[in-house]
């Protein structure tokens, strides 16, 4: 009976061919995945993805809501400074809570030109009187340096000196406060004609001080956040948590 023989010399392996056969070292068998194993792996990955995507979505949603609440806190601080200076809260106009002049009341204006146009404090850009009247339904602002004012006229003040451009929306020369997080649903446009600095639809801060329903001795301030059609989150200054699918105040 013939046998193949392998000899080892030192650290090196020598292969000796005997009886017309070659002798080689041990071979490692390579085993491929079976179809069933691949299907199991794909199924596990699909389950993990199904569990992870909602978690990521919830984290993003919470971040958007918290950011909007942070912007509301800044507005509240500016409104409180206005109240401390004037003894009353900024007026809210006559066009409803969406179209309000809160921006101009908080940053202050002047009205000294012969054409009766307004200017924001620190700016030389004219704001057409007719545009102000037509948009907000008012004849002027309380926080305003007026031409011909008497000695007891209070000088205008800027109660919100550093406003990020992303928190404003405009239509021509007219500006309003808007949340920087947007709808965030892209086609949510509660204020047609007004766009953000990035060109998106404006989601303005609603404001009522004349007859607030939820804060009778103060003011109502809120914004509607829409993540998907039919699901709204009301971020407001009368509830610490978002109010889901609440009718507009």
Image (tube, grey):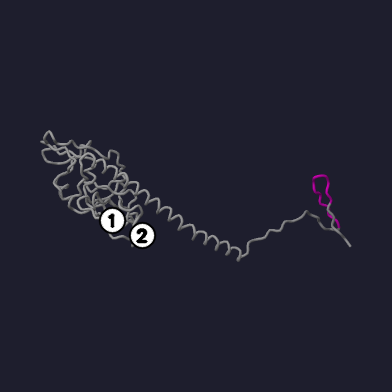
Count residues near mark 1 (Cα–Cα under 10 Å), then give few for <14, some for 14-19, many for 20+: some
Is 213 left, or right, of 58 in this rendering? left
Determine the image quadrant of residue 213.
bottom left
Residue furthest top in the image: 151
* Rendered residue at 41%/52% (across/down): 60
Which residue is at a point 23% across and 50% down the rendered structure image? 217
Residue drawn at point x = 33 percent, y = 55 percent: 225
On screen, residue 155 above or below 132: above
Calculate the distance from the C-alpha at mark 2 to the C-alpha at mark 1. Answer: 13 Å
Farthest residue toward the bottom?
36
| Residue 197 point in image, percent of width and height | 30, 46
Spot occupied by residue 224 in the image (x, y as percentages of width and height): 31, 55
In which quadrant will I find the C terminus? bottom left
For this view, does 119 lie left or right of residue 14?
left
Left or right for 23, reference 46: right
Magenta stretch: residue 166 in it? no
Name the residue carrying label 2.
228
Q: Nearer the viewer, residue 173 or 132?
A: 132
Q: Identify residue for label 1.
A: 189
Q: Position of residue 27 (x, y in %)?
A: 74, 56
Of 200 and 24, nearer the camera is 200
Q: Where does the magenta region start and end?
A: 7-18
Identified at 72% across, 56% down, the residue is 28
Query: Which of 82 and 110 lies nearest the eye of the viewer?
Result: 82
Residue 9 shown in magenta? yes
């Amino acid at each position: 009976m013939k046998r193949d023989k392998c000899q080892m010399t030192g650290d090196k392996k020598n292969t000796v061919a005997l009886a017309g056969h070659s002798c080689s070292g041990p071979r490692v068998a390579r085993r491929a995945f079976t179809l069933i194993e691949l299907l199991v792996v794909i199924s596990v990955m699909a389950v993990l993805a199904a569990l992870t995507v909602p978690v990521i979505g919830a984290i993003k949603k919470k971040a958007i809501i918290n950011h909007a609440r942070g912007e509301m806190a800044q507005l509240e601080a500016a409104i409180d400074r206005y109240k401390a200076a004037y003894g009353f809260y900024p007026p809210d106009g006559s066009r409803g809570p969406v179209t309000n002049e809160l921006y101009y009341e908080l940053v202050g204006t002047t009205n000294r030109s012969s054409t009766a146009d307004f200017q924001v404090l620190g700016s030389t850009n004219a704001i057409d009187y007719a545009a102000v009247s037509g948009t907000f339904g008012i004849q002027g602002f309380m926080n305003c340096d007026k031409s011909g004012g008497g000695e007891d006229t209070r000088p205008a003040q800027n109660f919100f000196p550093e406003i990020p451009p992303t928190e404003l929306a405009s239509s021509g020369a007219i500006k309003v406060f808007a949340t920087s997080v947007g709808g965030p649903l892209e086609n949510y446009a509660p204020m047609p004609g007004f766009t953000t600095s990035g060109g998106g639809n404006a989601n303005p801060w609603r404001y009522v001080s004349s007859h607030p329903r939820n804060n009778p001795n103060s003011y109502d301030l809120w914004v509607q956040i829409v993540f998907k059609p039919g699901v709204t989150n009301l971020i407001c200054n009368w509830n610490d948590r978002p109010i889901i699918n609440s009718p507009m105040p």
